[in-house]
Image: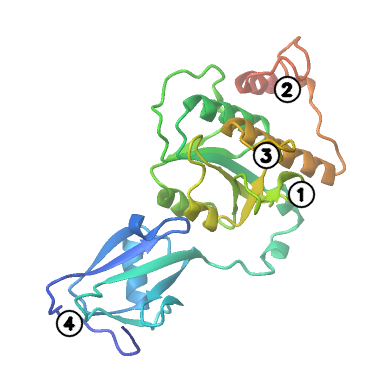
Amino acid sequence: ALTRRRAMEVPSTSGTPAVLRYVYPGVTPRNGRLVTAGAATLLSGCEIRDLLANDGVDVTRWQLRFQDKRNEGWARLEPDTMIAFDDPDRMRLDVALEPVPRPADARRLQGEDERDGYFGIGVVGGKNEANQGTLWRSAWTCGAAFTFTVAQRFAKSSADTVKVWTSLPAYAYEDWGAFASAQPHACSWVAVEMGTDATPLEEFEHPDRAIYVLGSEDNGLPSSVLRACAHRVALPAAEGRTASFNVAACGSVVMYDRVAKRRRAEGGVARLRQGDSLPGGRVGVDSAKPSQVLASSKA
């Protein structure tokens, strides 16, 4: 029940403690995180924010909505909103976190050099370490700021022939909620998933700051994650053929498309440099390892 009166601590007559269940964008309610609110039967929006903050939520980056069961929708949780836990069947409140809107003029205030931007790329539910390794190396080559995995299904091995880890960080998240809670500020999520409702890659305008999210080799991206992404992009396939790409190859193509379009927009062309190849090797054929390129640039 939703009321507008002063908060008070009144012992629950049902004996069941009040519980808050909160979810980040892309997380289903059944996978939400739980916070016990104790014996209180009435909580203000300000008190609810404090409880979430104590559980590790950065409340400066997220605005809250709660499930208003009476009106069957998600209402904005204001500091003076009062939530009553006086019904044994309504001792849990569902709370959804959504990014704090960015001011319309924020881009202008940050200056012209914001165009540089950055991007990261990763796989949700990946099961093949070789694919992750290939994507990691391609990410370094294309200028990514980081890579990541969410709920990976493979065991890490010690094999690393190119030592990308020395040059490009990779983050591992237990689940999508952990990833969402650590997302960079004002960075768009881009789902890379085939489908008729996705924007064809050749028509897609890459955000200055973007995180490209790829699905697993067998299941793709969960529908909840697709809904949470600001953009959805798909690679083209030959007429009459199914658009089914290896996840590492798909990610590599998307990153190259970003690099090529940005260089064209800046009046340049996407081209290979001698320094990107092994000493004495063929440009664009004998690919250099990241550690070798870094070493040669310091010489």
Residue linked to disc 4: 10
Residue type, mark 3 in image: Val
Q: Are marks 1 and 4 in contact (CB under 8 Å)?
A: no
Q: Are marks 1 and 2 in contact (CB under 8 Å)?
A: no
* Residue 60 seen in the current view: no
Estimate how packed mark 1 is, as few (under 14), some (14 to 19) or many (20 or more) residues with alpha carbons within 10 Å: few
Foreground: disc 1 or disc 3: 1
Residue linked to disc 3: 254
SS for callout 3:
helix
Residue linked to disc 2: 276
Residue at position x 44%, y 70% in the image: 64
Residue type, mark 2 in image: Asp
Q: What's the mark number on residue 253?
A: none
**Could you say where residue 222 lies in the image, as x and y percent from the top left?**
48, 49
Residue at position x 76%, y 44% in the image: 202
Residue type, mark 4 in image: Val
As measured in the structure, the alpha-carbon distance from the residue carrying label 1 to the one carrying label 3 is: 12 Å
Residue linked to disc 1: 203
Estimate how packed mark 2 is, as few (under 14), some (14 to 19) or many (20 or more) residues with alpha carbons within 10 Å: many
Q: Is residue 198 above or below residue 171?
A: below
As measured in the structure, the alpha-carbon distance from the residue carrying label 2 to the one carrying label 4 is: 68 Å
